[in-house]
Each structure stands twice: as C-alpha cells, then as structure tokens.
Image: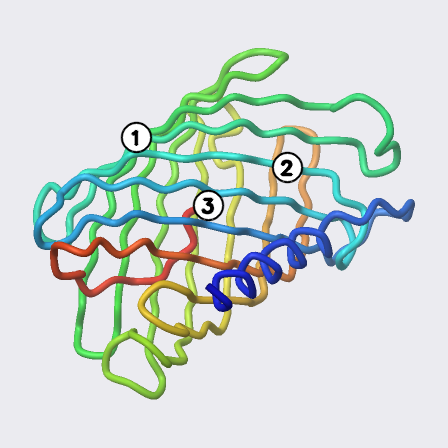
Amino acid sequence: MLENRKLIVFLVAVLSLCSFNVKAQNSKTGTWGIVTVTLPGDSTHKWGAYIELQTRTNTLFNQAFYYEAKGGVSYDIANNYTALIGTGRYITYDYDDLDGPPTNLETRLWQQLTVNQFLDRIKIEHRYRVEQRFFNTGYRNRFRYRLNLAIPINHAKIGPKTWYGATFNEIFLNNKAPHFERNRFYLGLGYQFNKSLSVQAGWMHQYNYTLTTAGAKNNLAINIQYRINRKKGKAKEFIPAMHD
C-alpha cells in the first residue's frame, strides 16, 4: 500500500512539473512528460490494453502547450507479433497565448503492428502504424515506422532492478504533399524497478517539415511506465518502449 501511494505521488509530481504555464519565447529545448499504464498479453491471455497521458512544454518544465490522452486494445497474433487498435484526443495551444483557445484539436484512430526480436542482449522492436487524423480543420492520413533498440546493462534481460539503454528513430509519412512530415530520434536511459514499474528519460530530437517551413526541437522526454501483471499466466520478455 505504501509503495502504491509513493507511486501515485511521483506520477502527479512529474505531470505537475511539466504543466507550469510561464510566458516565454520559443525555446529550442522542451519537455515531454508521459505516464503509461499497460495490461500486456502473456502466456495465457492474448488480449491486452493500455492508456497514456502526455503533456509537452515549450521550455524545460515550463509553458505547457500540448496535451494528449489515448489508449488502445492489443492482441498477440503470435509470439513477438502484436496488433493494436488505438484512439486518442490531442489538444495544442499557442505557447505565446496559453490562456487563449486551442489552436488545434485532433481526434485520432490508428492500427498498429509491432514485431519484436531478441538477439541475445540486443532487444529490437519494429513498429508499423497507420493513422486516421480528424482535425478541427480537416482530415489527413499518416504512416509511421519506428525502429527501437533496448540493451540491458547489468542483466542479460530487462527485469527487476535492471538498467538499460534505449534508442529509436521514427519516420512520419503522409499520403499528400509533403509526403515526408517528421523524423523523431530518441536516446535515453531507463531503470526497471520491479515487474511493474519502469522509468525512462532521455533526449528527444524532433524534426518537422511542411511545404512552407522546417524546423527541429530538442526535448527532455520522461516516461513512467506501469505494467499490470495478471495472476494467471507467465509474463513474456518485453521491451520497455515508449507507446507514443
């Protein structure tokens, strides 16, 4: 019970730090605060689910301008192959006018296939995602591919009391010009406390491209993940990758 209370306090503190509204100029370094709760499939159960809350700030821990809440239902097709259907709500504000109305509202649906490979200490994830994006200004499709690597440092597998390094690169493509929309690169360090709780933090570099502008932004990304382990069924080896 005490551990659960400490976890709740910690989660609230992280989201609060990422939500201060302070007027400032556009910053090259922002913050992403992410909390994810997952009910994964296991040796007995093929169905799973997850929910996630996220906020992003324009500067380090200040000027929160972006919020999202999303979730999905997953199904383990085969060993190391997982399909997922998800949906989410995304709200963006002008960081120079945080008290004003949102500049963008989005409801998103997506279908996803994740393929995991375990090559000794190197854990590899391939993720393919197709998105249907409904904006207050229209509709767009998007296609994403992410290659994710995780390497445990002090154990052969990622389990309780394990430090691990993590990196990924993801490309975002549209069916309409500009076909290349975004590239996202991440490099971080994580710690798996027990069978359920892990925390990961690192550098997130995001490059955005449109027909009229292009730009990049660095972010400190902090991701807290909590896995719900069922009493019946043996947990599979997993990669503590970000769901975003």
Query: Residue 57 placed where, x, y %?
Result: 73, 48
| Disc 3/disc 2 C-alpha distance (Å) | 12 Å
The mark total stands at 3
Q: Residue at x 11, y 41 (%)?
A: 77
> Which is more N-terminal, label 3 or label 1?
1
> Which is more N-terminal, label 2 or label 1?
2
Outermost bottom residue:
154
Query: Residue 101 placed where, x, y %?
Result: 80, 21
Residue 14 relative to residue 45: left or right: right
Q: Which class describes the residues within 10 Å of circle 2: few (<14), some (14-19), or many (20+)?
A: some
Element type where label 1 sits in the image: strand
Outermost front residue:
1
Cβ atoms under marks 1 and 2 closer than 8 Å: no
Q: Which class describes the residues within 10 Å of circle 3: few (<14), some (14-19), or many (20+)?
A: few
Element type where label 2 sits in the image: strand
State the mark number for residue 67. Answer: 2
Quadrant of the image occupied by residue 73: top left
Q: Which residue is mark 3?
A: 244
Type of the residue with mark 3: Asp
Q: Which residue is mark 1?
A: 85
Q: Residue at x 25, y 49 (%)?
A: 40
Type of the residue with mark 2: Tyr
User: Is 134 drawn above or below residue 30 in the view shown?
Assistant: above
Residue 8 relative to residue 241: left or right: right
Element type where label 3 sits in the image: loop
Closer to the observer: label 3 or label 2? Answer: 2
Residue 135 relative to residue 170: left or right: right
| Disc 1/disc 3 C-alpha distance (Å) | 13 Å
Type of the residue with mark 1: Ile
Camera-nearest residue between 107 and 125: 107
Query: Residue 26 placed where, x, y %?
Result: 83, 47
